[in-house]
Amino acid sequence: SGVGTVSPFDIKPPRDLSAMHQSRWAKLKDINVINAPHILRPNVVTNLRATKLGLPITPTVYTEAGWGKMSDLPDHDPSYYPTMDAYYPPSDGARSLDGGLSYRHLYQKAYPQWSLEQALVEQLAWLDGILPPNVEGILIYGYGTGDDGQDYGGNRELHRLMVQKFKAGTYNPPKPPVTPPARENWALCMASPVLPGNVNFRPQIGTDNIPLRTIGFNTPCLVWFEGIVKDKDGYRWLPMQIAVKGVTMRGYARRDLLRVWYVK
């Protein structure tokens, strides 16, 4: 997305992610440089402008490369990111699908042949392949901004694979991950209190923590069930991820106080 060959509208969660497959990654010959300023800004800012002014092409370092929301695209749909957040919850401590480390659940579905880190490195290699030859370095955004899935400084596996991919010598293609991708568990549901009033949805089991939200009568939602646990008093709690009106949370609700059923 952002190079003019694939649109967010081409992605159909939860099952059809074919628009993201590696075979669809744009070739340079297919990209209109003027329409892809996010990805190919060195071509415009450095090269085309220098040529117009009669200046030599300047060696360039490409900054703020990597993964992020692109809400300024002409074909941006305001519901796109909340929908993707609901189907593929942000991972690695991220608040939403933004930095590359937030995509672990999404990329398990889109690239089952790779780990998350392998997928990120393959995309960096793709970017390196379409940038002009005067780009001598790429700086990834960011290093320690973990809230948005961009704390690449702490991911040693990503560092190892980057060194392996970009050093001189023979590169061995990544092997498939040992663990199979997680099964898709999201379901369209309705949730409703068993008793009059609202039910608290809490970050932990028990009542000694502040609720994340309350769930009212007949609330439409997307739910990812994670099993069932008991507290010290014997009450059963539902650990789950729930998306209500585009906001996704992970927490617990008392099984005897909340009724959740599938919507056919």
Image: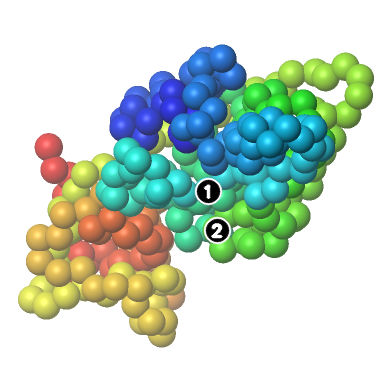
Front one among 19 and 13:
19
1 or 2: tag closer to the N-terminus? 1
Q: Which colour scheme is used?
A: rainbow
- Is the residue 71 above or below the residue 160 in the image? below
Quadrant showing the C terminus: top left
Name the disc covering residue 148, or none. 2
What residue sits 43% from the left and 75% below the top? 232
The kind of residue tagged 2 is Asp
The residue at 10%/73% (across/down) is: 195
Judged from this view, the residue extending furthest toward the bottom is: 208
Residue 237 horizontal side relative to residue 152, left or right: left
Q: Where's residue 194, x and y in %?
A: 12, 67
Along the viewing direction, whichever of 10 and 189 lies nearer the viewer: 10
User: How far across and down, in percent of the image, does residue 91 sit?
Assistant: 53, 51
What residue would you read off at disc 1? 68
Q: How far apart are marks 1 and 2 (CA)?
A: 9 Å
Amino acid carrying label 1: it is Gly
Which label lies toward us, 1 or 2? 1
Give SS at disc 1: loop
Q: Residues within 10 Å of mark 1 (few under 14, many from 20)?
A: some
The dot on residue 249 is: none
Which residue does the image show at 56% across and 14% down from the upper left?
Answer: 29
User: What is the x, y in percent for residue 9?
Assistant: 31, 32
Q: Do the residues labelled 1 and 2 touch (CB within 8 Å)?
A: yes
